[in-house]
Amino acid sequence: MNLKSFLSSRWAVAAGFAVAAVLLLVVAPALLSSFRLGLLGKYLCYAMVAVGIGLAWGRGGMLVLGQGVFFGLGAYIMAMHLKLADAPPSTGVPDFMALISSDGVPAWWEPFRSGAVTLIAIVVVPAAVAVLLGLATFRRRVRGAYFAILSQALAAAFAILLIGNPRSTGGSTGLNNFKGFFGFSLRDPANRMTLYVIAVVALLAMVAVARQLMVSRYGELLVACRDAEERVRFLGYDPAAIKTFAYAVAAVMAGVAGALFVPIVGIVSPNDVGIVPSIGLLIGVAIGGRTTLLGPVLGAIAVAWAQTSLSERFPSGWTYAQGLLFMLVVAFLPGGLASLRPIVRGWRERQRPSRTADSAGVPSLSGSSR
Amino acid sequence: MEILLSQLFNGLSGGSILLLAALGLALTFGQMGVINMAHGEFIMAGAYTAFVVQNLLGDAGSSLLVSLPAAFVVGGLLGLALEALLLRRMYHRPLDTLLVTFGVSLVLQQLARDVFGTAGVDVAAPGWLSGPVQVFGVAFPKTRLFILALAIVAVVVLSALLAFTPLGRRIRATVQNRSLAESSGISTRRTDRITFFVGSGLAGVAGVALTLMGSISSNLGTNYIVDAFLVVVVGGVGQIKGAVIAAFVLGVAQSWIEYSTTASIAKVVVLVLIVAFLQARPQGIFVVRTRSLV
Amino acid sequence: MNVDYLELTDLTVSFDGFVAVDRVNMSVLPGDLRFLIGPNGAGKTTLIDAVSGLVPATGTARWAGENLVGRKVHRIARLGVGRTFQTATVFEELTVAQNLDIAAGARRGLLTLARRRTSLPEVVVKAMDTIGLTDLADALAGTLSHGQKQWLEIGMVLVQDARLIMLDEPVAGMSAEEKDETGRLLQRIAADLTVVVVEHDMDFMRAFATSVTVLHAGKVLAEGSVAQVQADPRVQEVYLGPGEHSKAVAEAVLGEGA
């Protein structure tokens, strides 16, 4: 078995997941303070969104500018449940609502008293919104740019809707000050550690799902849709269904990420769901390499980490850095850092001339066809 | 009746602001397929230009008239720089231009915050625009009428430019068939640059108009950019008349739905209506027919 | 009884009042290698666009007992209608084998789609042999030459189990050898299937066509064997009329001494 086929074998993949699990579940908790570990948990939530963006944008060619909406749906659904669970049993009204008015809980909050409904809604609601918007645009073959603009407009409208209804959504401050999580106190460090573990497991599971989708025949079909959608249609497939599926998977990933974000970070507000955070989620994906499996994950974590550490020291510096990253990476390195890999490999192989023979991997242009 | 009239006026006024913001986009998005998110910041730059001009001249009446051409040039030069430095190499990747120009927009906003501060600044309206005009017992603010007039003038001038000048012919030829235009001896590079200058300049003019509506701050552009793009989407790419109709329809719809619900719900309803409209006309109100169907 | 024939009855396509295809009646039987020729703007490509569902049309296009007019593109494809485009569109970032595998799989179930491809389907292997690209199975389609891309496209139409195949200028831009190769490939295919070829290359048409339909201004001008069409005075007029075509082209269509 040569090196290349070993690296793509099942064993290598399993080993890769094992190494990632050890790093995140053993090494990171041992080295990081509980505050830093909480931050890492937050970055992992962004990484989950990034996995979905990599699938929909990198493989499917859909520029998803409104992932903040799905992230926000998951987050607000979870936050509503936590607020209702925290509410004093005598009234059943969450603290911030009781402060603003005496009208009680809006009817559409009520279903989220149930934990089961909440967990189901976190998956179903983002998926349903994505399927609706996806089918509406992809079926009618609305241009890719229009889809990007519509998904962005959705993010803007969602944020405005949240801000415009402070009594039921907490307005621009959002929902915060959660005390428990399904009966467990959020003040207890052991429970916070458990939450972190859940986030790690969720992220690894999403990476596994994305990997399976990418290497499957569906994954090939998605790439085919990205590069020549009309051609796929002429082969008898329905590209709208293919693209909508990837979009919905990305939406569910963002929704779950939002739902975990709430107990880990302790607050969700319109600042996490509008246009700017929605596009902000893309830069990590772009840097890591939009078409790769792990590029988006690593890119998202790196960008979130850089944002925290830079904006602690230079508040306005981060905005400049983010802007420059968008300009430079997308314009000059559209494949992200992952696209540098073949260059590095080529350089390394030139150092070791004996191995160049079987590693070219690029098919010859003038291959005989008869 | 008075409510009807004043709602209609609010809608037309809102539509005229949308139109000013979207007119330049209709040109840059329509002609080159560039999704310029920094268009909003060009609007902001136009507004700050009006602020600077007023501080230099000190007189509100003359400064408005000086600001309009000055902001056109400022916006236009920003557009030229953007086109030359970044977008030139990206015409075959239209979706990526959105992300690149979003980066530009972040930088310009932060620049504005660092230069002009985070608090909003005010530009005084000239005396001849203060107060309302009474029509059928309804008060129409003169500033809003001025913006309406400005939007109409901008549309007329731009349409005339496209219809009757050699430049306009080159722009239309390039929109309809880029490679044919090129092989007929049109320098599409030069056409692109001029189009971008004009489109971005219009953003600057829109910015001056917005100073009449209230104080200006670094996030002025973000408030308008998405709605302006929706106008272009609904209107159909590469068509001025589409943008005009779409802007006024969206303006009136927003104001009417707002009247019976709230501003935030109106935004969502309008978006749903737009998606529904695209089911019937996926390419917007007007379509430029080309031979290539795939 | 074999009902695999294409029959167009009063097929009409108009764009904003401009009639691009005007009440065309035409039938093509299996085993036929039908060439569709005519001056620029005659409506050749629009005609096959209409049959494949890309542009709305009126009239009927009956294929295998079903009327195709008004159906969606991917539904028509599933009825066994395949086509290629003037500019070869293959999936450039997938390999030759992946391209063919996708083309072969429109009827796959969800479970198959969700799994990785372990071996190549029989039809794909066979098609690679037919189009002569077996050696390049793992090459990215984007790296193929122009002619090879056209063959790959034809292969994709073959494996999708199309029984009506419409090709839009398959030999445009090919070398003389590639053209011969393509012509023989088409003759092999046409033995079992119904094949319609839109073509400008008249030498190619004369060498390989079984029958020819001449379109002019959206209407059928003449139909028959190559010799019959060449002898038709109306065809001569269209190709010799002022401003339509050069003498060289006319000679190519009508034979020497036209």
Image (tube, rainbow, N blue to C red):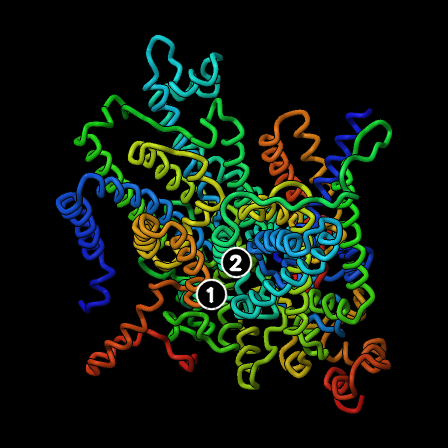
Report the mark closest to the observer, 2 or 1: 2
Question: SS class of the residue under badge 2?
Answer: helix
Return the residue at label 2. Answer: B101
Q: Return the residue nearer the eye: C2 or A142.
A: A142
Q: How many marks?
A: 2
Image marks 2 and 1: residues in contact by CB distance under 8 Å: no
Q: Return the residue nearer the eye: B2 or A80.
A: B2
Q: Position of residue B47 (x, y in %)?
A: 63, 51
Question: SS class of the residue under badge 1?
Answer: helix
> Looking at the image, can residue C116 be seen?
no
Residue lying at the far top of the rendered structure: A90
> Looking at the image, can residue B139 be seen?
yes
Q: Position of residue C216 (x, y in %)?
A: 80, 70
The chain holding disc 1 is: A
How crowded pointer 1 is (Cα within 10 Å; few <14, some 14-19, many 20+) is rated as many
Q: Return the residue nearer the eye: B162 or C255.
A: B162
Q: CA distance from mark 2 to mark 1?
A: 10 Å
Q: Position of residue C3 (x, y in %)?
A: 62, 54
Above-or-below relation of A278 to B204: above
Image quarter (top left, top right, bottom left or bottom right) of the N terminus of chain C: bottom right
The chain holding disc 2 is: B
Above-or-below relation of C217 to A54: below
Q: Horizontal placement of A345 versus C250: left or right?
A: left
Q: Amino acid at mark 1?
A: Ala
Q: Quadrant of residue B239?
A: bottom right
Q: Horizontal placement of A180 versus A83: left or right?
A: left
Q: Horizontal placement of A300 versus C48: left or right?
A: left
Image quarter (top left, top right, bottom left or bottom right) of the C terminus of chain C: bottom right
Return the residue at label 1. Answer: A331
Q: Residue at x 77, y 57 (%)?
A: C15
Q: Residue at x 54, y 29 (%)?
A: A164
